[in-house]
Every structure is written in C-alpha cells, then in structure tokens.
Image: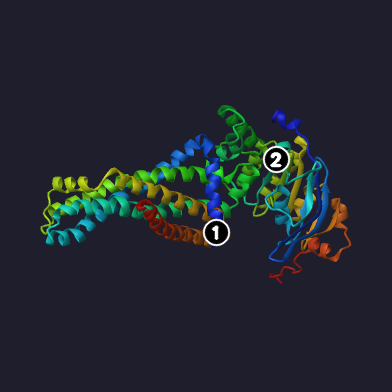
Amino acid sequence: MNPDLSQLSGVNLVVRGLCKQFRNQPVLADVSFSVNPGEIFVIMGPSGSGKSVLLKHLIGLEAPDAGEILINGDPVTSPEVAAKYRMALVFQSGALLNSLTVGENVGLYLTEHRLKPEEEIQKIVREKLADVGLRDVMDKMPSELSGGMKKRAAIARALVTEPQLIFYDEPTSELDPVSAVVIGEEILDLNQRTGVTSLVVTHERELAFGIADRIAVIMEGRIVTVGAPDEVRNAADPAVKNFLQADFKRQPKNLRA
Amino acid sequence: MFENIGEVVLLCWRTLLALPQGWRQRQKIFEQFFEIGNASLLMVCVLSFFIGAVIALQTGPVLAERSLSSAIGGVVGIAVAKELAPVMMSILIAGRIGSAMAAEIGSMRVYQEIDALRTMNINPIYYLVLPRMVAIVAALPMLVVFAILVGWFGGALVADYNQRMGIPMHAFFSDLKEIVNVKDVANGVFKSFCFALIIGSVSCHQGLTTMGGPRGIGRSVTKAVVNSIVAIVVFDYLLTRLLLS
C-alpha cells in the first residue's frame, strides 16, 4: 500500500438548490444534499433521471442555472478549488485516452503537470495499478483490456491525483457480477484506506446497498429521498418503492410436466 | 455561422496565448509534424508535379503559337509559386490532415476523453490543439516550398518533351528566373502559413464541438474539410488582394 494514501482525508460536499435546464426542459430541479468527509454517498435513480448531469455539475464540467456546490465551504466553480482540493472522476466508460498506453494514462496527471521525475512516475503508476489489482498491463493499450480492467485502470488514474473527493459514474455498469463485486470492493477498500469522500452514481441496487453509508434517490431531476440504506429501503414513496423493488413477475415454465 | 467563426477565432487566439508553453509539448509537436510530412509527401509530390505539367501543357502551345515561348517558364513559375502550390497543397492537407484532426479530437470528445483531461486539470487546447496547430503551421509552408520546386520541374519537363513547345530545360528555368523572384515564392509561402492556421483552427474547433456518436464524428469531419476549403478559397482572394496592393 502506498504510505501517502493513509495521510489523505476526505472533504465535505454541499449541494444547495441546484437547477439546470436544457432547451427549457428541466433536468435538475432544486437538488440539495450534503456529503460528509470520508463518507460513501450513493446517488441512485433510473436512466434519464439526471444523475450524470448532476455529476458533471459536481466536478465542474457544467455550470448550473441556479444553486451552489460547496467543497469545504468553497464554491466548486472558484479557481482556488482546483488548487486547494484534489478531486477525481471515474467515468462510466473509463474514458482512458485510446492513443496512450495504460501506464501513460495512469501517469498522465503527473506527467502533464510535471509533478515528479519520470522514474518516480513509473513507480507510482505501478503502485496504483497494483492497488486496483492490475499487473503487467502498463504497456498495453486500453483497447486490449476488458471492461472491468478498463474501469480499474480508470480508478488507478483517479488515485494518482491522491484525491480527497472521488466521483464514480456508473462504476459497475456493463460488468459481469463478479467484476461488479470486485469494483465495489475496490471502492470500499479505497475509502477505508484513505478516508476519501466518495460519491457514486449508479442505478444498480446491489452496488448501492452493498457499499453506501447513505443513499439519495433522484427521480426526474429531484432528490426524493435521502438516508441510510435501511431507511431508503423502507421509504414510503411509491415511486422509490417501485424503483427499488422492480422485478420480473414471470414464473418459469415447468416443461417436464 | 458567425458564432462558429467567432469560436474559431477565439480558439486560434487561445492557442496563440498557449504558445509560450509549446516547448513542453515538443514531443507531441514532432509526432504531429512527422505525421503530416510522412502522410503527405508522396501525394504532394505527385499532385504538384502534374499541376506544373498541366499548366505548361495548357499555356505552352498557346504562347508558342504567338511567339511567346520565352514566357512559358515565367507563367508556370508564377502560377505555381503564387497560386496553385499554396492553394492546392492546402486543399490536399485540409482533406488529409484536417479530417484526421477533426476525427481524432471528435472521437475523444464523444468518448469523454476530453472531459477526463479537464477533470485532471489538463487544458485540451494546450494538450490537443497547440501541438497540431504548431505542427501544421510549420509543415504546410515547407510542403509548399517542396511543391513549388516539384511543380516547376513538372512544367519544365513537359515544356522540354512536348513537340509543340520544345523548350529546353535550361531555357525554361532561365526564363523562370527572369520573371519569378524570391518575393513571389515568399507570397506563396505566406499564403500557405495563413491557410495552415485556417485548417488547424477550423478542424480542431470542429473536433472540440463534436456532438453525438459516430454520426456526429462523421459530420464534424465533413464540416472540417468543407469549411476549411471554403475558407481557403475566400482567404486566397483576400490575401492576393492584400499582397498585390
């Protein structure tokens, strides 16, 4: 384990009254919640509920029409935030640069900002890849990796920045159940080792209830419930119930009869 | 349209502002420079040779009939150096390199690679646009100088071997030297420098504003090439007016 990781500490994230419209179509409507330092906070919701747009606002890739996002009290849009706090986003697709090797991808932040000498960058990259269970992939191209390996490489790339706040966008989508559990455990393990504040956006119930300290459910751009996993599971809202309990009703045919 | 033009000018300006940091991107600049030269040299050679040849073939017999054989070298020399080499090579590069720039940056945009750069506090203009712009601005004028020389040679060869002209090579080049001066070649090179800026900024802008999936990338590539060619032709007229005055 990298000794630096244990010295990290998470930050507090507060979202107040966030609103966003695209072509007069409201996508986020008065979204408010807060995430405590070191917490794993999961935002769940069906497809098209505004989860990814919300995430883009949190990382500063989109500007809200109204409302504010504060990191330890500083607005996320202020230039000082980038210098003061380290944040990282693990994209749904991994978003590894296809023209670079996995090693170059993971070390990109350090290389481009010239933060360490080349040999040290190589060492850090190897360590971070090992932290997510990837070995002997440094010289491979992203196209040679499986979906799960790409996501783990993307987590390693995020770890290189030694983040205090890490966002995960649908980290287990398109993965088989075993890989999904491995990624979920990586998120938990990382959180326990580093104390990093983690915000996970997902529509997968198993992942959400498996890793979350608290869960918020977003529907049609509004947060409809926030609480501990048990509180959310027992929520009275029929739409939330329907989302959490949706399943096939069909019974298998008994062909032997 | 005006919004797009404004955005392209802004991108060009921001790239110029990032220029002092260009040295740190020298590796990427060299890779792009090599890509442009390596991918285009043979095509530039073939295209410019036949451009020079066809100009000699079209104008030579007409001039020879009017006892103006001594002007053939000058006509081919001026046409190739001031107009045909810069414009045709720029159109070739817009098709070959501009499309590649728009496709590469466009696919990075669609597959969130550019968003990933932003989250790592890496400016896409500095990381993606600057190396491509510097490389094309350095490579295109060099290719144009090469194209001018090959074009002249193509013209000279046709003038020598075509029976309706029969002008020996040394006479062709001697006439050319009398009429064409360094300023004419410099005009062509200056034009190609401006066209390189147009191709680079239009193509990178199209890439950075790509929306949608593979269809969006295709649309960006088409727009990058078409808009670059239209802008080259329009600016060719404007620059010619400017340089003539």
Amino acid beneath label 2: Ala
Q: Tell me if residue A256 can be seen.
A: yes
Amino acid beneath label 1: Asn
Q: Quadrant of residue B233?
A: bottom left
Hey, which residue is sitting farthest front in the picture?
Answer: B245
Left or right of B211 on screen, residue B98? left
Answer few, some or many: residues within 10 Å of disc 1's Cα (few below 14, many 20 plus, some between 14 and 19).
Answer: few
> What is the chain letter for disc 2?
A
Question: Toward the viewer: A77 or A223?
Answer: A77
Residue A10: image location, x then y, percent: 78, 38
Please give the name of the residue rendered at 46% of the width and 42% of the height, measured from the top-left corner: B134
The secondary element bearing badge 2 is classed as helix
Which mark is on residue B59?
none
Which mark is on residue B4?
1
Verify CB contact (< 8 Å) between mark 1 and mark 2.
no
Residue to which mark 2 is pinned: A82
The secondary element bearing badge 1 is classed as helix
Answer few, some or many: residues within 10 Å of disc 2's Cα (few below 14, many 20 plus, some between 14 and 19).
Answer: some
Left or right of A254 on screen, residue A15? right
> What is the chain letter for disc 1?
B
Q: Tell me if residue B106 can be seen.
A: no
Please give the name of the residue rendered at 18% of the width and 50% of the height, measured from the top-left corner: B156
Left or right of B100 on screen, residue B7? right
Residue B20: image location, x then y, percent: 53, 36
